[in-house]
Image: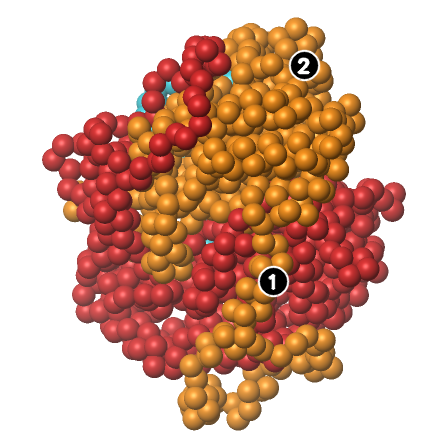
Chain colours: A cyan, B red, C orange
Amino acid sequence: MDPQQLRFTTSHEWIAPDGTVGISDHAQHEITDVVFVELPKSGRAVKAQEPCAVVESVKAAFDIYAPVAGTIAAVNEETAKNPALVNQHPYGAGWLYKMTMASPADREKLMTHEGYQTFLKSATH
Amino acid sequence: MSGEKVVEPLSFEKSAPGRKGIPWPVCDVPTVPVDKNIPAGLLRESPALLPELSEPQVVRHFTRLSHLNFSIDTNFYPLGSCTMKHNPKVNDRIVQIPDFAGLHPLRPHELSQGILEILFEVERWLSQLCGMDAFSLQPSAGAQGELTGILVARAYHEHRGENRPVVLIPDSAHGTNPASVALAGLTAVTVKSTPDGQVDLDDLYQKLNKEVAMVMMTIPSTLGLFEPRIQEIAKKIHEAGALLYMDGANLNALVGLVRPGDLGVDVLHVNLHKTFATPHGGGGPGAGPVGVKKALEPFLPVPRVALENGVYRRKFDRAHSIGRVHGFQGNVGVLIRAYAYMRLQGAEGFREISENAILAANYLKAKLTPLFPKMPLGACMHEVVVSGEGAFGPGVRTLDVAKRLLDHGYYAPTIYFPLIVPEALMIEPTENESKETLDAFVETVRAIIAESKSDPDKVKTAPHTTPVRRLDEVRAAREPRLRYRP
Amino acid sequence: MFIPHTDEQKKEMLAAIGVSRFDDLLGALPKNLLRPKLDLPSSLSEMELVRHMEELASRDHLAQSYLGAGAYEHFVPTSVWSIALRGEFATAYTPYQAEASQGTLQSIFEFQTLVCELFKMDVANASMYDGASAAAEACLVAAKHTGRNEILVPETVHPQTVRVIQTYLAHSGARVKTVPCPSGVVELETIKKHLGPDTAALLVQNPNFFGCLEPHVKGLSELVHSAGGLLIASTYPTALGLVAPPGQYGADIAVAEGQSLGLPLAYGGPYVGLFACTNALLRKMPGRVVGQTLDADGKRAFVLTLQAREQHIRREKAMSNICTNQALCALAATIYLSLVGKNGFQELATLNFQKAHYAAEVLARRGFPRVFAHPFFNEFAVRCPVSPETIVKKLSEKRVLAGLPLGAYFKDRADQLLVCVTEIKTKSDIDRFGDLLAEAAR
């Protein structure tokens, strides 16, 4: 996926126009080697900023929040089987789940890729 | 896995059909057919594949495995907050006295007077040393002690008709604190620390309200510092109707010197495997007795031990008790060891312990100060927390230095804890390590720091001399192999 | 005794610190509370201590015991503790630095394998505090995994285990629902009535508290699974040389008090809780786990793994607050099982079975018939011609423990005594026990 098409949260998730959700390249780098991914059940209704997945490294666990409100439509079983995909292809094969957004306009309120880069710079010192 | 290099094969890999490590006596009673007495469906279909080895093979296997460990008996083990002190050998002998080892936990009290006296006395000693009114000896470990203490506090508030769902915990606390709070059905709220590692009082007092059941503090803190305003804090906590819980992980700094109860602590747990020198055992068994002030005593777990007309009894009739946390009376074997240690020390011996532990930690701190640019000022208690920031060569981290210490025969200090100190190294020498050992340790740290600048790769790839080198933990977690399969 | 500093060295150390008196280091401590007077005796020498402890121990000297009920008297081969108490094992700590802890780590890996083998389960952890807390943690896992809140606990589960479960569940949102068992075992029909959409799990103890083998374990497993709940089986490891292990009848979680595997009775602990489950529950398993991996040179090595479930990382979101395991007890169990071995373990179970069946026959002849007709392993309840408390008291005077009066736990079983006979009893012990009981009943 082209990062330019994605919208980003301050908690480092991205969401594509079709509702696909993953974590940013910056996040996967900070987490280091992902060893386990816990995905939500399909069909679950989630609020914006609700924790609905977990990404684990050897020494840490990170909650992944829903970028917008909606329903979990599908989960990436391949990532669950091979968590390294999150490190290798954060914007591609390493996506986590797909959601049906309650209101696609919510997505538009999130940061663009450019905005996210600025946010990262301001967040680090 | 074929072609795999191994340090010591698994017992299963040495097994050969028909070998036996211990013969059982011939059955001397008239036998009945098993299959006539137990229906086939309730019998085991295939045997458990236990290894088949002779006794000498078993002895050598485990003795060889033991050689792969660092331990207090073999190495300086400055693991901060774990109080790795000497475990007196006489205690091994005492717990193996057959009349102790063979004591069934459900014996009637008439046949348990010796052991009940010990339990009664352990409770008395702990109460005296900690300035508390009563102790439950049931919790098996510090974490279970915490859970017990929180449940007791919760029951206390509920009994008074108060609903207080929140427990305040400093951000420097051990992870078991919030985990235990969650298990007790309460909500952990974090209190910030100031840059010098003390609790941020503004933040604490702002969060202290009618919702708060308890404030959990580690005293001295996980940074090895004593909070000088503790009595004032306790007063404020009590004024808010809340309780002060002390995580007793660092009691070795206070024992005999200051009593937590005198400071205003209402509930605490003590780790007998730390201050009271029972063996850590490679990760247990420990014991985590919980002490309380009078008002909380009715809520302690049952059974309690009481002395009535010269007879020791186990008491179960406590209407407000939170119940049991152990199947029986707790880790009594550990309690026996702790009792023996108490008697060896005597009242005066405990003060010697804390004073010498504090002396050793401050000595280490003084000697390490020139080596670490971010060393905080002032005296520490029984352990010294050092930040590795700015101390090591290019790209060398605290983890690498910890691993390099292993090459020199030192177990690594606790690292990356407390979380609020970047690149933390937490060093606890205890009262048992000689000045010679401490001096040698400091010289080793100095040499490693120099090496981290002259040959950083050597440090980054350490250890080099241990039975195995650095492990692939990512592989272990991604493809868990948790048991042997032929 | 344990403090090495000479007075001269102490002075040098204070000088290096830059203070003149030790008390200068205590500036943060409240002066008025320093060095309180303690109402405690002075120290004993090692010699005096040993004498004192031997005297205390001798007060509780006992000739023989027929008491089981969750803690069992088994023979412990000498090499078990002669190895386990080696300082390299006993005085090490949690193996955080794997490179300097392979002895502990490999022994735990072997322990996990042995527990899986005993139970016929997929995965096991590095141990829990005891059997009771292992059962309680299993109930929490079941509630979390199913999202349901009711644990069915039959009366045939050890009452003290039930109390621990109640303490652990008290504020978890889950609760215990007691299932009556008048026949001494769990009946399918009763369970059918209690199962429902809230059932997170059924906990079955097998052999049960009364010593009976639960006759319907397979059926119970099917029932609870068809209702969407889990089966938790609590068992007695020594019995598993003969009787069906939890994995054979479809348990999702298997737990046990591991004391019978080489640990002394020691008035209740330290023991070791065994905990195993299916692969499906692996990530929800509480406690420490050791896994196999490779080191930088490609050597096989062992390491604590799956730590992201644990309290030091997940804090309030951890699967459990458990921090350490009972490593040394797990090591003793590992050595014990390695010595006993595959065939020896079956022989041991058979020996227990035969001795107990002989004892049941002797006791019946002496007027103490069995209460239940169900198959049993090495423990059984008998009906007493006079009150069991009287029997226990009379035998106590002869320093023999007759067993556990069940009336203390179940009002309607006031005439029943729970008796256990393990491999350590000889025929003449058992015959004499029969004589003593008959005498006490007179």
Three-letter code for the amino acid on which mark 1 is drawn: Leu
Q: Between tags 2 and 1, which lies in front?
A: 1
Residue at 20%, 37% in the rendered image: B14
Quarter assignment of residue B372: bottom left
Secondary element at image label 1 = helix
| Residue under numbered circle 1 | C56
Residue at 66%, 31% in the rendered image: C438
Secondary element at image label 2 = loop
**Residue C282 or residue C188, whichever sits in front:** C188
Residue at 47%, 72% in the rendered image: B430
Horizontal and vertical percent for residue C286? 50, 36
Dividing the image into 4 quarters, which one contains the C terminus of chain B?
top left
Horizontal and vertical percent for residue B192? 62, 57
Between the C-alphas of marks 2 and 1, the distance is: 43 Å
User: Is there any visible trace of residue B63 in the rendered image?
Assistant: yes
Horizontal and vertical percent for residue C216? 55, 11
| Residue under numbered circle 2 | C183
Three-letter code for the amino acid on which mark 2 is drawn: Ser
